[in-house]
């Protein structure tokens, strides 16, 4: 079974990836 810490770390990475994706899209919209 997963540890709570690992689950949180994975969620952090996933949310960070989504944030980067949104930044890329916003930059593309600006140009």
Image: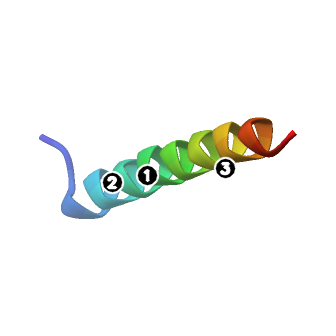
- Residue 15 lies, in percent from the top left, at 43, 52
Q: Quadrant of residue 17?
A: top right
* Residue matched to label 2: 6
Q: What colour scheme does the image use?
A: rainbow
Q: Under tag 1, what secondary structure?
A: helix
Instruction: Tell me the residue at 66%/37% (across/down).
Output: 25
Q: How many marks?
A: 3
Q: Is residue 7 above or below residue 8?
A: above
Q: Using a 10 Å C-alpha cutoff, classify the residue at mark 2 as few (fewer than 14 neighbours), some (14 to 19) or many (20 or more).
A: few
For marks 3 and 2, the one nearer the N-term is 2
Q: Is residue 3 above or below residue 31?
A: below
Instruction: Tell me the residue at 43%/58% (across/down).
Output: 12
- The answer to whether 10 appears left or right of 13 in the picture is left
Q: Is residue 10 above or below residue 12?
A: above
Observer-side mark, 3 or 2, equals: 3
Q: Residue furthest front?
A: 30
Q: Nearer the viewer, residue 28 or 1?
A: 28
- Residue 18 lies, in percent from the top left, at 50, 44
* Residue matched to label 1: 15
Q: Are marks 1 and 3 in contact (CB under 8 Å)?
A: no
- Quadrant where the N terminus sits is top left
Instruction: Tell me the residue at 87%/39% (across/down).
Output: 31
Q: Nearer the viewer, residue 15 or 22?
A: 22
* Residue matched to label 3: 23
Return the mark for residue 27.
none
């Amino acid at each position: 079974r997963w540890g709570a810490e690992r689950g949180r770390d994975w969620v952090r990475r996933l949310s960070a990836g989504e944030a980067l994706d949104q930044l890329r899209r916003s930059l593309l919209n600006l140009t």
